[in-house]
Structure formats: structure tokens, C-alpha cells
Amino acid sequence: MIKKLCIVGVGLIGGSLALALKKHAYVQTVVGIGRDAKRLAAAQAAGIIDIATDDYAQCQDADVILVAVPLGAFENVFAQIKPYLTPDTVLTDAGSAKACVVNIAQRVFGHVPENFVPGHPIAGTEKSGFSAAFAELYLNRRVVLTPVTRTADWARARVQAMWQAAGAVVEVTTVEHHDLVLAETSHLPHILAFGLVDSLAKQKDAQEIFRFAAGGFRDFTRIAASDPVMWRDICLYNRDAILQALKAYESDLSELHAAIEKGDGDSLEIIFARAKAVREQFNF
Ligand code: NAD
């Protein structure tokens, strides 16, 4: 049970955690910290948070502080939390890339605090803002924690219990492994979806093209409606891992390109059958 949870950035991710913990009576008071008083008041009126404020002093006696802002805002937010981070409070985050967040913590606090537990819920939708939040977002979804050597076990246990109370399955891995795997499975597909929609939209007959868009196109490009700022930041802050994933994909894409150019049906069928088998095996 958490007595006081401070959420910096009450959007889809932070708001959904608040709703889930409230639903399961795992939290007493949720404090929403942000810059926009009007939006925070609306989140309070919607019952997502109990207290709305821009005062980071609220962090002082929190059991848990969750930072759920775009990656580009972390440095500023950590600096504001710093004067109020006491040893009994656990600081955690939901950022989509982890090496950058650990590096920012190191820079701002002078070392990675032992009560900081880097985390990332592998759950989301293409919608953003607190109005898109819902209590079931984390149900049976994975949350990856990437503790570093200094991270205290008690702090990790508190964050793990919190996400489990929200219905999530918690996994622990290294910062590096997280960033590479997420670059391949989440960041790359988002970049491809944004890129494809933008590329088609630039064509002269774009309206006509989209008129014919059917199920496959809709499935593949749903995530291109995601928040541009969040995805800009993910590309900037997980740059190396994303470049590595893009390079591997570009090479495989040129294999497909060559097979189509040569009319090499056998190769195409082998590649498609291989992908179909994997897709069916994992049933994501
Ligand atoms: P969101 O846009 O729904 O919410 C972000 C919130 O942060 C907004 O309320 C915004 O006003 C606030 N904010 C922005 N800058 C701020 C600042 N400087 N100070 C205080 N508040 C600030 O975004 P989200 O989808 O909830 O994502 C939040 C974080 O979680 C991001 O780091 C994102 O990478 C990560 N994440 C997102 C998803 C997803 O699918 N949406 C999944 C996992 C992790």
C-alpha cells in the first residue's frame, strides 16, 4: 500500500497508473505535479489525482515519485525534484529509453541515487493526455525495471509491488538490453509507421491513396497517430540503439527489394513464410 504517490506528468501513462492503483485501493493520496494548472484541475475533477500542484515540495514525504513526462523534460524535472528527494522516498520513471534517464539522473544528482528505480511500462496507446488514461492499461502487460548496481533492493521491491498492484507483470533487465530490444520492437515500428504515412501523404494523389486504405494499412499505421513530441524525444534519446535497429532493417528491406526486382518468388515466399511462422508462434 502506498500512502502518497506523486506523479510528475499526469498523462496517459501517469494517469492510468493512478486510476489502476485507486481501483485496487493500493494508494491513499495521488498528487499530480505539472505545469498546466487548468489541465491538472481537470485531471483532479476526473478523479485521477487528489491534489493538483506545481510545487515540487510535495515530493518530500512521498512513498513513490513517478516521472512520466517526455524524455526531453527529464533533466528539468529531476532538477526540480532533487531538493525534496529524501532517503525514504522511491523515485521511479516510465521513460521509453533507459540509458538516457540513468545518465540524466547521474548528471543531476551527482550519482544515480540508490532509491531511484528506472522503469518502463510496455503498455500504451496512440492517444495521449490524462483524458486517454484508463485503469486497465497495465492489466497483464509487462513493466520492465532496469535497476543499476547502486539501486537498493527495497526500492526496487516497492516499485515492483506498485506495478503488480496495477495488474502488470514485472520483469527486470539491464539498461542496455532494454534499449536495444525496445528500439527493435517499439521504436523501429513507430518510425516506420510515421515514415510510411508521411511518405504517402506527400504524393500528389494522397487523398485518393488514403481513400483506398483498408485493414492492413490501418493496422500497420495506427501508431502513426502517436504524440510527435514523445517520439521525437525517443529518437533523440535512444539514438544509438535505434540506428542499430534501422541499419539491420534497411539491410533486410533491401533483400526484399532485390527479390521483388528480380521476380524471385522463391525468396519472397521463404521470407514471408518465416515471418508468418514467427508471428503465429508468438501471437503478440
Ligand atoms: P502524455 O503526453 O500523455 O503525458 C505527458 C505529461 O507530461 C503531460 O501531462 C504533459 O503536460 C506533462 N509534461 C510535459 N513536460 C512536462 C514538464 N516539463 N513538467 C511537468 N509535466 C510535463 O505522455 P505519456 O504517453 O503519458 O508518456 C509519458 C512518458 O511515458 C514518456 O516518457 C513516454 O516515453 C513514456 N511511455 C509512453 C508510452 C505510450 O505508449 N504512450 C508507453 C510507455 C512509456
Image (cartoon, grey):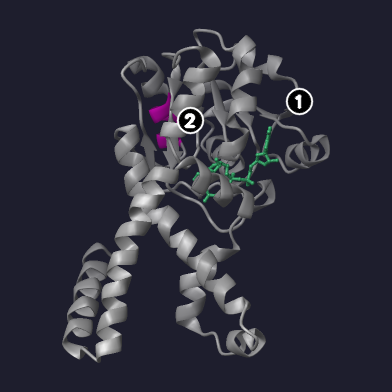
Mark 2 lies on residue: 101
First reached walking from the N terminus: tag 2 or tag 1: 1
Please tell me whether residue 27 is drawn above or below residue 122 in the rendered image: above
Q: Outermost residue, top direction?
A: 87
Q: Secondary structure at mark 2?
A: helix
* Span shown in magenta: 159-165
The stretch drawn in magenta includes residue 163: yes
Quadrant of residue 174 in the image?
A: top left
On screen, 108 above or below 77? above
Q: Residues within 10 Å of mark 2 (few under 14, many from 20)?
A: many
Quadrant of the rendered structure where residue 66 is?
Answer: top right
Label 1: how many Cα within 10 Å (few below 14, some 14–19, many 20+): some
Closer to the camera in the image, 253 or 231: 253
Number of disc labels: 2
Q: Nearer the viewer, residue 139 or 15?
A: 15
Give above or below for 245 relative to 178: below
- Left or right: 154 with respect to 76? left
Residue 180 x %, y %? 33, 45
Ligand 1 shows up in the quarter that is: top right
Image coords of residue 274 (percent x, y): 19, 73
Q: Give the camera-side residue of 154 and 95.
A: 95
Q: Residue 76's image quarter?
A: top right
Q: Residue at x 41, y 13 (%)?
A: 114
Q: Residue at x 32, y 36 (%)?
A: 176
Q: Amino acid at mark 2?
A: Val
The residue at which mark 1 appears reads as 54
Disc 2 versus disc 1: nearer the observer: 2
